[in-house]
Image (cartoon, coloured by chain):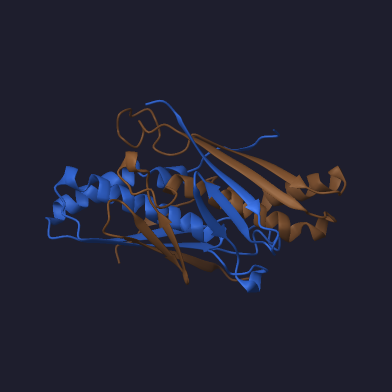
Chain colours: A brown, B blue
Amino acid sequence: MAKTTFRADVSWSGESVRSVARIRNKEVIIDEPTSLGGTDQGPNPVELLLAALGGCLNILITTYAPLHQVEVRGVRIRVEGDLDPDGFMGKNPNVRPGFQEIRYHIQIDSPSSPENIRALIEHVERVCPVKDTLKGVPVVPVTQ
Amino acid sequence: MAKTTFRADVSWSGESVRSVARIRNKEVIIDEPTSLGGTDQGPNPVELLLAALGGCLNILITTYAPLHQVEVRGVRIRVEGDLDPDGFMGKNPNVRPGFQEIRYHIQIDSPSSPENIRALIEHVERVCPVKDTLKGVPVVPVTQ
């Protein structure tokens, strides 16, 4: 398949730091809690990144389950990430601004064999586009 | 400041591949277009990752504008990423599953000096937690 370009258009709502992301015909509000200067109307950007990872794993699990003869009754994925605000606030040059580690825990409710479930999870972990992107990707500013 | 742990809980809605991410008291629907087996009720995970980057840049621009004496009237950030589905579909082992490149374009509507606007953007690019995370981060499965 040819390379596909995905896109999100983010704009400032004019209200505190509240942002609106438009993705095709969808809209997602990105905000901060009031303690961080926002209006608390949506998840913050780093939380949204964790949600993207969890969503990606979940979508692949439900997509590839039949291939691995796994009957899925439920999926729950907890995603956590550690970040030290001293990094992006510039208080400590030795602390990176972004996440230091991201962890996820997958729980599949299924009557299928543990071997098949394990093979499904290994497949998904190997091909997950968001997980793979988090290994590192060039992020390039463009001027027009 | 001490390390902070952020969290998202993603679960399968039971309907096609549609996922629900719960983040504090917020909810984000993550889905795929019908052509990819979803119900098209939300952005897909890789689009959400792009939105997180745009939201992060936007929130930092509006947060740090006063520090750089920049009056902000509007912000628009376009984020794009190239991904070849052959990677995650396993059709070509030489293609990575994730994004190959992510690009962003920042447009700030402001009457302030170009020098101050440039300094603001440079500051934001340097400290953006999502942009920094995309340089690479350990993503670790946990078993309980």
- A3 shown above or below B29: below
Check the picture and name the quadrant holding the N terminus of chain A: bottom right
Could you tell whether A130 is left or right of B50 in the image? right
Q: Nearer the viewer, residue B78 or B82?
A: B78
Whole-percent x, y for residue A11 in the image: 33, 62
Give the residue at x 30% y 51%. A17
Could you tell whether B20 is left or right of B109 in the image? right
Give the residue at x 12% y 56%. B112
Give the residue at x 61% y 54%. A56
Q: Nearer the viewer, residue B123 or A14?
A: A14
- A125 shown above or below B33: above
Whole-percent x, y for residue B20 in the image: 59, 55
Q: Nearer the viewer, residue A103 or B29?
A: B29
Q: Is residue A25 visible?
A: yes
Rendering quarter of residue A59: bottom right
Check the picture and name the quadrant holding the C terminus of chain A: bottom left
Give the residue at x 52% y 37%. A81
Q: How many discs appear?
A: 0
What is the residue that sits farthest to the top in this orientation?
B2
Whole-percent x, y for residue A89 in the image: 31, 35
What is the residue that sits farthest to the front in this orientation?
B25
Whole-percent x, y for residue B90 in the image: 71, 60
Q: Is residue A133 visible?
A: no
